[in-house]
Image (tube, helix red, strand yellow):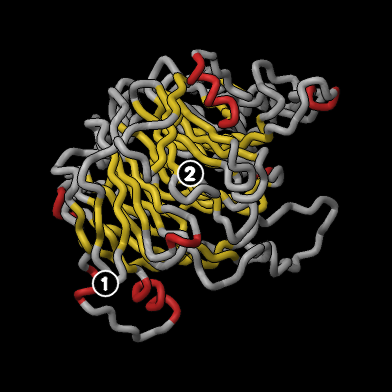
C-alpha cells in the first residue's frame, strides 16, 4: 500500500495514505462570508465624481470580492485558484484546528477521569497518535492533551453591547504533548477501553503496546518525572515484518487485562492476550480465510470471543476466537472494491457499518449473515453513494445507533442520521441542493482526512486527523 508523503501532495493525481487512492482537490460544503481587506480608506479632495442613483460611483472598482452563496458539495466541482472556502460559524457549537509537527495517519481518544456526559466549555480531550515523518528516525507516538476548547462566539443580532459572554470566546486551544520515540511510521493506533494502554501497528509489522499512565498523569501534575523506561513499549512480532493496518482491543469487561486482534497484508490475523505477569500470549497459527489484505478488525461490543474483519477482497467475515481450525464462521460479499473500514455499533450489536474504496458506505444487519450458509443473498440495510472517493474511516456514534460519522478521500467528514424517513415530507427539503440524501446531517472540510472518532465522554464532539493536523468540532445538528 502506498504511503502519503509527510508533506501532502498538491496535485490531484498524487497517492494518499491509508487505503486512499488517487483523488481530486475538494472543498467543504459550508461557505462563510468574505471580509473586504482591500477597501479604499482614503478620500480625494481633487476629484468630484457624480454618483449613480444608488449612491455608488459607476466608474470605480471598489475591490470587493465576489461571493458565491451557493452550497458547495464535495466531489461535484473544483474551485478556481482564487476561490476560498470558509466554514460557517453559525453551524458549529465548537470548531478548532490544531497543527502538529508531522501528519498522523491514525489516532484514538484516551479515556480520562474528567467525567462522562460533559457538555460544558471549555472542553478538554486526551489523544494518542502515531506520526508519519519525512525521516523514519523522526517518528514518534504522541500523547496529547487539548484543553481550552471554547465554543464558537456567536454573533447576536440587534445587540450593540460591547460586553463579551464568557462562554462565547474564540481563544486558541492549549496543546500539551509527550513524545514516545518510535523510528517507524505508525499505520494504526488504538487505545484500550479498560486502562491507560495503547497499541500501535508500525509499517514494519511490529505491534507496540504502550503504558500511557505516567504520561497522562504528567499533564495534570506539574513536575512529574517520566522514567525513560516508560517510553519503551512491549513489542510483539507475530506478523514477521509483514505490514498491516488492522488492530483492535477487546472491549469485554472480562478482558480488562488486555486482548488484541491484529491483521496484516498477507491476510493473517492473530489474537494476543495479556498474561498476569504482564507478558503476552499470541495464537500460534493465524486465523485465515481472506484472499486479500486485512484492512480493519473490530471486536464485537457484546460477544467476548467474536470479531469481524474487512478485507481488500471485498468481504466481511465473522470469526470466533475459540474456533479450531482457525477459520471464519460467516462471510459476506459487501463490495466489488476494497473494504477499507468497518465499525460495530455499540448500542445495537447486530449493526455493522462498512466503507469501501468506491466511496460507498453501508450498514448491515448481522442477523441476516447466516443466510449465506444456505446460499442466500445478503443486502445492506442502508447504502449511500454520496461520496465519490474512497471511504477512509467510519464510526457509529457511541450512544445513538442511527448516527454515523464518515471520512472520505474527498477531504470531508460527513455526519448522518439513519433514522430520517424517506417519506417524511420535512426530510425532502434539502435546501434546494440536488443529489443530497435526506439522511445527511453535516459536511465538514478536513484536508486529506484519514481517521475520525467521537469523544465518547463529551457527547457530539468529533475529532479528525488529516494533512493539516487535527480538527475538533461539535455541530449544531448532533
The answer, for residue 188, to whether it is visible in the render is yes
Q: Is residue 442 above or below residue 21?
A: below
Q: Residue at x 28, y 78 (%)?
A: 226
Q: Is residue 339 above or below residue 177?
A: above
Q: Looking at the rendering, in which quadrant would you find the C terminus?
A: top right
Q: Looking at the rendering, in which quadrant would you find the N terminus?
A: top left
Which quadrant of the view contains residue 72? top right
Return the mark for residue 325.
none
Kindly give the residue lying farthest to the front in the view shown: 324
Number of marks:
2
Please state the horizontal and vertical placement of residue 203, each as a whole percent of the image. Answer: 21, 43
Which structural element holds mark 1? loop
Task: Please give the residue where the numbered disc 1 appears in the rendered image.
Answer: 277
Please state the horizontal and vertical placement of residue 423, each as a whole percent of the image. Answer: 81, 20
User: Which is nearer the N-term, disc 1 or disc 2?
Assistant: 1
For the residue pair 123 and 2, the one nearer the viewer reads as 2
Q: Tell me, yes or no, whether the two marked residues, 1 and 2, touch with CB atoms within 8 Å.
A: no
Horizontal arrangement in the rendering, residue 61 relative to residue 210 (left or right)? right
Please state the horizontal and vertical placement of residue 192, each as a whole percent of the image. Answer: 41, 59
Task: Please give the residue where the numbered disc 2 appears in the rendered image.
Answer: 452
Mark 1: few/some/many CA within 10 Å (<14, 14-19, 20+) = few
Mark 2: few/some/many CA within 10 Å (<14, 14-19, 20+) = many
Horizontal arrangement in the rendering, residue 20 relative to residue 111 (left or right)? left
Q: Residue at x 31, y 20 (%)?
A: 13
Q: Residue at x 66, y 30 (%)?
A: 440
For the residue pair 443 and 266, the one nearer the viewer reads as 266
Q: Residue at x 34, y 47 (%)?
A: 261
* Mark pair 1, 2: CA separation: 34 Å
Q: Is residue 383 above or below residue 191?
A: above
Horizontal arrangement in the rendering, residue 244 relative to residue 93 (left or right)? left
Amino acid at each position: 500500500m502506498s504511503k502519503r508523503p509527510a508533506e501532502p501532495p498538491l496535485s490531484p493525481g498524487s497517492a494518499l495514505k491509508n487505503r486512499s487512492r488517487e483523488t481530486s482537490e475538494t472543498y467543504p460544503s459550508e461557505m462563510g462570508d468574505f471580509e473586504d481587506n482591500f477597501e479604499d480608506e482614503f478620500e480625494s479632495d481633487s476629484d468630484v465624481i457624480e454618483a449613480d442613483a444608488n449612491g455608488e460611483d459607476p466608474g470605480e472598482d471598489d475591490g470587493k470580492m465576489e461571493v458565491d452563496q451557493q452550497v458547495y458539495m464535495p466531489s461535484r466541482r473544483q474551485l478556481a485558484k482564487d476561490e476560498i472556502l470558509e466554514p460557517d460559524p453559525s453551524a458549529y457549537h465548537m470548531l478548532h484546528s490544531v497543527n502538529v509537527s508531522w501528519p498522523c495517519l491514525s489516532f484514538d481518544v484516551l479515556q480520562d477521569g474528567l467525567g462522562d456526559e460533559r457538555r460544558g466549555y471549555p472542553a478538554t480531550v486526551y489523544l494518542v497518535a502515531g506520526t508519519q515523518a519525512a525521516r523514519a528516525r523522526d517518528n514518534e507516538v504522541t500523547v496529547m492533551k487539548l484543553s481550552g476548547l471554547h465554543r464558537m462566539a456567536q454573533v447576536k443580532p440587534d445587540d450593540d453591547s460591547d460586553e463579551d459572554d464568557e462562554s462565547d470566546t474564540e481563544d486558541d486551544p492549549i496543546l500539551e504533548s509527550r513524545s514516545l520515540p518510535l523510528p517507524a511510521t505508525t499505520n494504526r493506533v488504538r487505545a484500550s477501553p479498560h486502562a491507560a494502554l495503547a497499541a500501535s501497528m508500525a509499517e514494519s509489522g511490529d505491534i507496540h503496546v504502550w503504558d500511557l499512565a505516567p504520561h497522562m498523569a504528567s499533564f495534570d501534575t506539574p513536575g512529574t518525572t517520566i522514567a525513560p523506561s516508560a517510553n519503551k513499549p512491549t513489542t510483539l512480532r507475530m506478523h514477521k515484518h509483514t505490514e498491516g493496518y488492522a488492530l483492535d482491543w477487546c472491549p469485554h469487561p472480562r478482558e480488562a487485562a488486555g486482548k488484541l486482534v491484529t491483521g496484516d497484508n498477507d491476510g493473517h490475523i492473530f489474537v494476543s492476550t495479556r498474561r498476569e505477569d504482564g507478558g503476552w500470549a499470541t495464537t500460534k497459527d493465524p486465523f485465515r480465510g481472506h484472499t486479500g489484505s486485512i484492512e480493519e478488525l473490530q471486536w464485537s461490543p457484546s460477544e467476548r470471543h467474536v470479531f469481524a474483519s474487512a478485507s481488500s477482497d471485498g468481504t466481511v467475515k465473522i470469526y470466533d476466537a475459540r474456533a479450531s481450525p482457525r477459520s471464519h464462521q460467516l462471510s459476506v460479499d459487501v463490495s466489488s472494491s476494497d473494504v477499507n473500514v468497518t465499525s460495530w455499533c455499540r448500542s445495537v450489536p447486530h449493526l455493522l457499518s462498512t466503507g469501501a474504496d468506491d466511496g460507498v458506505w453501508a450498514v448491515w444487519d448481522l442477523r441476516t449473515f447466516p443466510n449465506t450458509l444456505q446460499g442466500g443473498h445478503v443486502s445492506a440495510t442502508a447504502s449511500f453513494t454520496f461520496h465519490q472517493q474512497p471511504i477512509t474511516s467510519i464510526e457509529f456514534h457511541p450512544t445513538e445507533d442511527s448516527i454515523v460519522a464518515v471520512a472520505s478521500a474527498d477531504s470531508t467528514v460527513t455526519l448522518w442520521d439513519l433514522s430520517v424517513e424517506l417519506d417524511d415530507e420535512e426530510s425532502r427539503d434539502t435546501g434546494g441542493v440536488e443529489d443530497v440524501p435526506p439522511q445527511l446531517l453535516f459536511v465538514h472540510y478536513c484536508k486529506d482526512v484519514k481517521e475520525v472518532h467521537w469523544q465518547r465522554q463529551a457527547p457530539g464532539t468529533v475529532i479528525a486527523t488529516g494533512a493539516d493536523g487535527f480538527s475538533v468540532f461539535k455541530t449544531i445538528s448532533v
